[in-house]
Image (cartoon, grey):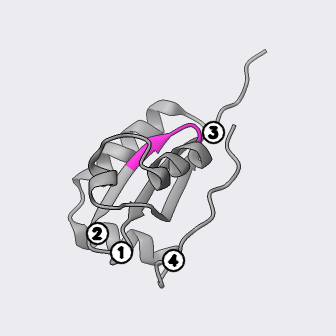
């Protein structure tokens, strides 16, 4: 029996919205928590990137990974437009329950 997993591509920002981070994960709750607590010495910790403002869901890991790579190549203005379609005020989104 095959277990259906859900994969996420997400965008986080810092409180002043000056820096964006695009990521990919199969456990969005856990990954957002890691960003918020500075679990890793990383880009997101250095720039205080803790606010989830956008995510997409996928049933296929390869599609999610490909989408993450695609978004990472976008200019900032295109990333902002993507966020503002569903979240025009850039409010923090509560991460959905992950598998």
Mark 4 vs mark 2, foreground winner is 4
Farthest residue to the top: give it.
1
Q: What residue would you read off at disc 3?
A: 6
Along the viewing direction, whichever of 38 and 3 lies nearer the viewer: 38
Q: Are marks 1 and 2 in contact (CB under 8 Å)?
A: yes
Residue at 47 percent across and 76 percent down: it is 85
Along the viewing direction, whichever of 77 and 95 lies nearer the viewer: 95
Q: Characterize the local packing of mark 3: few (<14), some (14-19) or many (20 or more) Cα atoms within 10 angstroms.
A: some
Q: Characterize the local packing of mark 1: few (<14), some (14-19) or many (20 or more) Cα atoms within 10 angstroms.
A: few
Q: Pick the quarter of the image with the C terminus.
A: top right
Q: Are marks 3 and 1 in contact (CB under 8 Å)?
A: no
Is residue 16 in the magenta section?
no
Q: What residue would you read off at disc 4?
A: 87
Mark 4 or mark 1: whose residue is earlier in sequence:
1
Q: What residue would you read off at disc 1?
A: 81
Q: Which residues are magenta?
A: 23-27
Q: CA distance from mark 3 to mark 1?
A: 24 Å
Taking the image as shown, residue 87 lies to the left or right of residue 23, namely right
Q: Secondary structure at mark 2?
A: helix
Magenta stretch: helix, strand or loop mostly: strand
Q: Pick the quarter of the image with the N terminus.
A: top right
Q: CA distance from mark 4 to mark 2?
A: 14 Å
Taking the image as shown, residue 94 lies to the left or right of residue 38, namely right
């Amino acid at each position: 029996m095959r277990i259906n997993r859900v994969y996420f591509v997400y965008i986080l920002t810092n409180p002043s919205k000056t820096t964006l981070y695009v990521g990919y994960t199969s456990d969005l709750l856990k990954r957002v928590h890691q960003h918020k607590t500075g679990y890793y010495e990383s880009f997101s910790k250095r720039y205080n990137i803790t606010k989830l403002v956008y995510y997409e869901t996928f049933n296929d890991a390869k599609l999610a990974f490909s989408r993450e790579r695609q978004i990472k190549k976008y200019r900032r203005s295109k990333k902002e437009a993507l966020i503002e379609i569903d979240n025009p005020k850039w409010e923090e989104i509560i991460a959905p329950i992950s598998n």
